[in-house]
Amino acid sequence: MDPRTNNGIGSWFRADNSQDSTNGNSWCSFPYKDYSMGFAPDLQAMTAGSNAVYPNPLWNKYGGQYCGLEAWVYNPANGRNITMFIIDGFAHEWVKTPGSIDLMLGAYTSLAGNYPSSKNNVLSGVQWGFTGRRSQKYSFGGAGDATDSRAATGGSCSASTDCQSLCCTSAGKCTSAGSGCIASISSNKLVAESSSVVSSTSPSGVSAAQNGSPSSVPLAESSTSPSSTPATQTGGPSASPSAKSSTSQSNTPSIQNGDTLSQVTTNAPTAFLGTNNGMGSWFRADNSQDSTNGHSWCSFPYEDYSMGFAPALQTMTAGTNAVYPNPLWSEYGSQYCGLEAWVYNPANGRNISMYIIDAFGNEWVKTPGSIDFMLGAFITLAGTVPANKSVVLDGVQWGFTGRRSQKYSFGGVGDTGLAANPWDSSASTS
């Protein structure tokens, strides 16, 4: 199997269903549930062409090699990046193209953003790759998931407690799947529209494979905004977009959370291409300590919970450090503001989609590729609220997806008057 980036179809399966040839027990020799966060790659590829299953002695060998491996999975249709694990093997006769994977129902729903209505619902162009880590629970013969510990419909949900339906309302109650889904922060369920299909086959106590998708490079945030023209946050160069680059069908814009995302066909970035690495600091939208006043360098208002970050101002402006009223300010602002990026935190495996919403003053950029996150974006990526400015994320990775947000484009509407701090409530949007 390709140790780097794999591409293919993302179908879905259930843990214990005759139609999917599964019986609740994985090829990886542990029990699993519909909401186990995992997928199944091609069994034939994992077993070097032997298609080994119990009681073939090679079953243990290859299961020990692949089961539990952590992978990033990227859905180009909506820009979602989810961290999952290999929890089964996908029977080769169902593998339509090299790199295709079969996703457990819950993992599919998280990646697609909705429940599939039939086996014809599949995700196209799914990308995935290994992170270099392995889960003990999902290792060959591990504990797996014997019971579903998530809250049932009607139960309480929070940033640390997910719903079986993957739908948590803003009031902190689990509801059936539908348009009101709000995944908790810790679950990393960045939901959005898409579809998936393909079934997995699981003989005897060995389940078929699911699907998974790599491609994940962390993103960043930051901002410094003096007067009505914001300052900059952190950022780092290291050119060449990373895995998460989105390949949305044709050039048709997609709508997400009221924002329009379009493919970047003109005024494309010339810096920060590929995968960038650096430190991830944080800032607030309107705070004298952070040299911000509620107005971004990108010429729009923002809030503490705007989902964005700021790369190095000097790098974005080709060394000019242009700010208002320098005429180059609008030129470079139009080139970089609103660009969508994937951002990865290696400390917890979280991958979050964010946008460039400000610029990071070069004097604060400690290492190339470092970025400054808006407070809410930092919390989402870190999983905790920072106690002080000394709290930063090390080794953050990020790269462009190839799309731009209309709301966060230079001179866009930005964010004003967000009613409440979503991170203080029992549920949050991703």
Image (cartoon, helix red, strand yellow):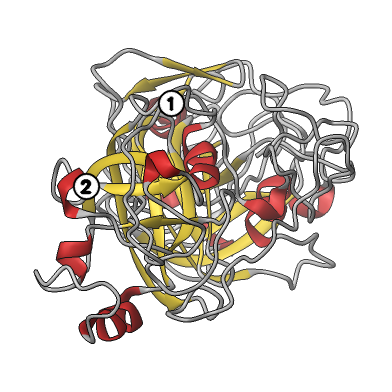
Residue 112 in sight here: yes
Front residue of 188 and 351: 188
Image quadrant of residue 413?
Answer: top right
Q: Position of residue 195 (x, y in %)?
A: 41, 27
* Upstream in sequence: badge 1 or badge 2: 2
Label 1 and label 2: CA atoms lie apart by: 16 Å
Mark 1 lies on a secondary structure that is loop
- Residue at figure coordinates x 38%, y 73% from the top left: 67
Residue 1 in sight here: no
The amino acid type found where label 2 is placed reads Asn
Residue on which the image places disc 2: 7
- Residue at figure coordinates x 81%, y 40% from the top left: 427
Label 1 close to label 2 by CB (< 8 Å): no
Q: Residues within 10 Å of mark 2 (few under 14, many from 20)?
A: many
Q: Position of residue 324 (x, y in %)?
A: 56, 29
The amino acid type found where label 1 is placed reads Ser
Residue 9 is left or right of residue 140, and the answer is left
Is residue 402 shown above or below 22? above
Front residue of 358 and 44: 44
The quadrant the N terminus occupies is bottom left
Residue on which the image places disc 1: 194
- Residue at figure coordinates x 60%, y 54% from the top left: 372
Front residue of 269 and 107: 107
Q: Position of residue 129 (x, y in %)?
A: 31, 60
